[in-house]
Image: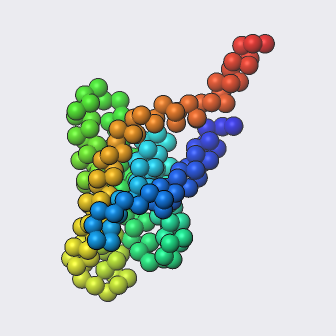
Amino acid sequence: MNRNLKVMIATALGIALFVVLALCLQVPVFENYYLCLGYIAMAVYCYSFGTISGTIVGVFGVVLYCLLISGLRGMPGWALGNVAIGFGLGLTFELTKNMKNRVGKYMLWVSAVIFSTAIGILGLKSLVDSVIKSQPFLARVAMNLYAFVADVVVLIVALPLCEILDRPAQKLLKGKQVSEESANERK
């Protein structure tokens, strides 16, 4: 199986994982808000499979989650916000993955989490919500502050998991090739 097909299959599994984590592990933190643990899947996919794969996991994970739970309520803004988060994280991971300075690398990652989540949730999601619901933009920003904080917390907690789960992810992508090479060596 070629690498692109493996990434496509892994991405589809990531979407399912996002939905399962978001549905089954709801940790309440504020009034009606909870930690969306699906962001762990999104961050790991951005790190291990690339910007596009991680962004697709975040966007389509939200779309499927919203369709299962509440129809389209809240989904357009959240999905668009995840585009910004996915691209921000994915590009930062690609540029810094091989940095030797761990402290500097993690500082850049945390900064990327905060900045891209602010653009995605406080900016894009609030803008879409204000247009759809005909509410002032700043009112929507205030309403999305809880979601921003909760999402930042989950994404920061996910950062060490990205490195830990990268090795199994890379083995998944190389698995068949390694098996074929060892079979050829036996012949």
Report if residue 169 is visible in the image. Answer: yes
Quadrant (top left/top right/bottom left/bottom right) for the N terminus: top right
In this rendering, the count of numbered labels is: 0
Compared across the picture, whether 177 is left or right of 120 comes to right
Report if residue 51 is visible in the image. Answer: no
- Looking at the picture, how far across and down is residue 140, in whole percent? 26, 76
**1 shown above or below 110:** above
Give the quarter of the image for residue 98. top left
Q: Residue at x 22, y 34 (%)?
A: 104
Q: Residue at x 32, y 36 (%)?
A: 96
Tell me the colour scheme of the image.
Answer: rainbow
Quadrant (top left/top right/bottom left/bottom right) for the C terminus: top right
Q: Closest to the observer: 48 or 30?
A: 30
- Looking at the picture, how far across and down is residue 166, in whole percent? 46, 35
Extreme top residue here? Answer: 186
Compared across the picture, whether 15 is left or right of 152 comes to right
Q: Residue at x 75, y 13 (%)?
A: 186
**136 shown above or below 60:** below
Q: Closest to the observer: 174 or 150?
A: 150
Extreme right residue here? Answer: 187
- Looking at the picture, how far across and down is residue 3, in whole percent? 61, 38
Compared across the picture, whether 8 is left or right of 142 comes to right
**41 shown above or below 174:** below
**45 shown above or below 81:** above
- Looking at the picture, how far across and down is residue 174, in whole percent? 59, 30
Q: Residue at x 28, y 43 (%)?
A: 109
Compared across the picture, whether 156 is left or right of 15 comes to left
